[in-house]
Image (cartoon, rainbow, N blue to C red):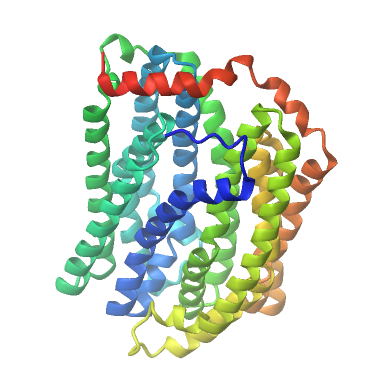
């Protein structure tokens, strides 16, 4: 299950590595979109807007949790690569403690803070109750399922299994569709039914993933001694996780600020913005999957001290992203209106107004997608070679640019002015990572890679065989 990308054609290797990630991303988006799609078609734009109004707040709550799950994967993968199976089990125990704490926090916030959070975002009164119900069920009651699934996926990726998380994601997506149709279309439960379908499908997928780990990898069946807290291990996970979580947190706060401004313009604008964001997520998914794959490519080649290979791959990926910008722009200009209409019933009296508003956002953002592609490739390259400071600075710049410009442009130009806040944030946020990468000097980070990494692939393969056999 390992993939050595230190030799061979760079672009071909990156593309091959990115393909499974792209498929997983499609199902992840499908999972996130299905509630809005079914509710919008069955119940109209107001219920659609109520779900969309929760997006940035939900991401805010999930940011730290997802960062800690990723940190668990990083730490476990280090011990797994070194063949230290005792510390793999210790890290799993630490992950369980951290996951339980995160689940408790998510449940508390979801149940108690949903209404104050939605009011803070100035959610329109006609959308407030639906948005609060959706958050309370998905985050409050479904929080444990979210945490367990993401932690289980992180554990599987750490030991080289990238396919099984995809299977469980597919299971969750299919179940979510079935339950959405049953609860929303069959029982007429609207936003509440969509939230219940999401929470149930997340929980089932989480249980399936945890059961699979216990049965497929006997070494993960922990003894009482393994559960003794290792505070050094927990601190290491938290240190990495907090750094990753902060990056997501800055993005979420920026999006929440924009949404707070958008909410002030009424339900039609909220519905248009929420729907346009979903169309945009589908359009730029390939940006994220290819640059995440390149981060792995850059990390491996830094360890192999093949700096020119990193530079070659960087420019080839950049050229590919710019070509994709043109293709995506052409597709959105041609079919953007149709994409928005897919989410809303043709009988909805607000449909034409929503489509017109969404068209403005999509066309403004699309024309500036090259800067989005550039900021993503620069930040992920730096993350891949172990420099997390400049991506964090980039996130701070984006946060203040998006938030400040959304308030300013919204006051001056109305909701159309708000559409320029995020793209200008991309441009300004690009400056720190671009200066860092092109100034050079990042090659010195290779000195921090221990000599033991040269044999990590062999040790990982040996450890993988041991995992499948058990003790």
Residue 404 image-quadrant placement: bottom right
Where residue 357 appears, x then y in whole percent?
A: 55, 82
For this view, does 220 lie left or right of residue 29? left
Q: Would residue 252 be seen by someone viewing this image from the given angle?
A: no
Residue at figure coordinates x 56%, y 77% from the top left:
332
Where residue 23 appears, x then y in whole percent?
A: 41, 55
Is residue 105 placed above or below 266 in the rendered structure? above
In this rendered view, identify the residue nearer to me: 41 or 8.
8
In this rendered view, identify the residue nearer to me: 309 or 97.
309
Is residue 220 placed above or below 326 in the rendered structure? above
In this rendered view, identify the residue nearer to me: 284 or 466.
466
Where residue 92 appears, x then y in whole percent?
A: 37, 23
For this view, does 28 lie left or right of residue 41? right
In this rendered view, identify the residue nearer to me: 73 or 311.
311
Residue furthest left in the image: 187
Residue at figure coordinates x 44%, y 39% from the top left:
65
For this view, does 155 lie left or right of residue 247? left
Q: Would residue 202 be seen by someone viewing this image from the given angle?
A: yes
For this view, does 230 lie left or right of residue 419? left
Where residue 309 appears, x then y in whole percent?
A: 71, 39
Residue at figure coordinates x 29%, y 46% from the top left:
168
Residue 150 image-quadrant placement: top left
Image quadrant for the N terminus?
A: top left
């Amino acid at each position: 299950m390992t993939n050595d990308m230190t030799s061979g054609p760079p672009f071909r290797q990156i593309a091959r590595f990115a393909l499974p990630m792209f498929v997983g991303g499609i199902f992840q988006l499908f999972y996130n979109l299905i509630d809005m799609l079914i509710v919008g078609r069955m119940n109209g734009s107001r219920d659609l807007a109520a779900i969309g109004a929760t997006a940035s707040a939900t991401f805010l709550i999930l940011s730290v949790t997802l960062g800690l799950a990723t940190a668990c994967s990083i730490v476990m993968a280090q011990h797994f690569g070194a063949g230290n199976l005792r510390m793999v089990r210790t890290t799993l125990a630490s992950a369980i403690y951290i996951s339980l704490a995160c689940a408790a926090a998510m449940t508390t916030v979801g149940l108690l803070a949903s209404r104050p959070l939605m009011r803070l975002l100035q959610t329109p009164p006609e959308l407030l109750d639906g948005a609060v119900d959706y958050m309370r069920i998905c985050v409050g009651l479904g929080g444990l399922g979210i945490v367990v699934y993401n932690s289980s996926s992180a554990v599987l990726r750490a030991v080289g299994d990238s396919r099984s998380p995809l299977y469980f994601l597919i299971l969750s997506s299919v179940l979510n569709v079935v339950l959405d149709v049953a609860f929303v279309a069959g029982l007429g439960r609207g936003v509440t039914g969509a939230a219940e379908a999401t929470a149930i499908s997340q929980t089932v997928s989480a249980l399936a993933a945890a059961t699979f780990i216990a049965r497929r990898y006997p070494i993960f069946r922990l003894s009482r001694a393994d559960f003794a807290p290792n505070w050094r291990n927990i601190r290491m996970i938290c240190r990495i996780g907090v750094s990753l979580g902060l990056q997501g947190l800055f993005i979420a706060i920026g999006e929440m600020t924009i949404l707070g401004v958008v909410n002030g313009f009424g339900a039609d604008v909220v519905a248009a913005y929420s729907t346009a964001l979903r169309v945009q997520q589908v359009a730029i998914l390939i940006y994220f999957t290819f640059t995440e794959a390149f981060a792995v490519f850059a990390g491996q080649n830094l360890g192999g001290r093949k700096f020119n290979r990193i530079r070659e791959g960087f420019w080839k990926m950049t050229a590919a992203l710019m070509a994709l910008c043109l293709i995506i722009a052409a597709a959105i200009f041609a079919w953007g209106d149709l994409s928005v209409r897919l989410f809303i019933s043709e009988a909805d009296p607000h449909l034409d107004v929503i489509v017109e508003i969404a068209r403005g956002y999509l066309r403004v953002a699309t024309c500036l997608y090259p800067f989005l592609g550039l900021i993503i490739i620069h930040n992920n390259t730096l993350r891949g070679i172990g420099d997390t400071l400049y991506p964090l600075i980039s996130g701070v710049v984006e946060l203040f640019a998006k938030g400040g410009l959304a308030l300013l442009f919204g006051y001056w130009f109305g909701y159309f002015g708000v559409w320029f806040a995020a793209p200008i944030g991309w441009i300004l946020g690009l400056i720190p990572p671009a200066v860092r990468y092109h100034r050079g000097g990042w090659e010195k980070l290779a000195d921090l890679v221990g000599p033991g990494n040269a044999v990590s692939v062999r040790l990982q393969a040996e450890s993988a065989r041991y995992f499948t056999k058990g003790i």
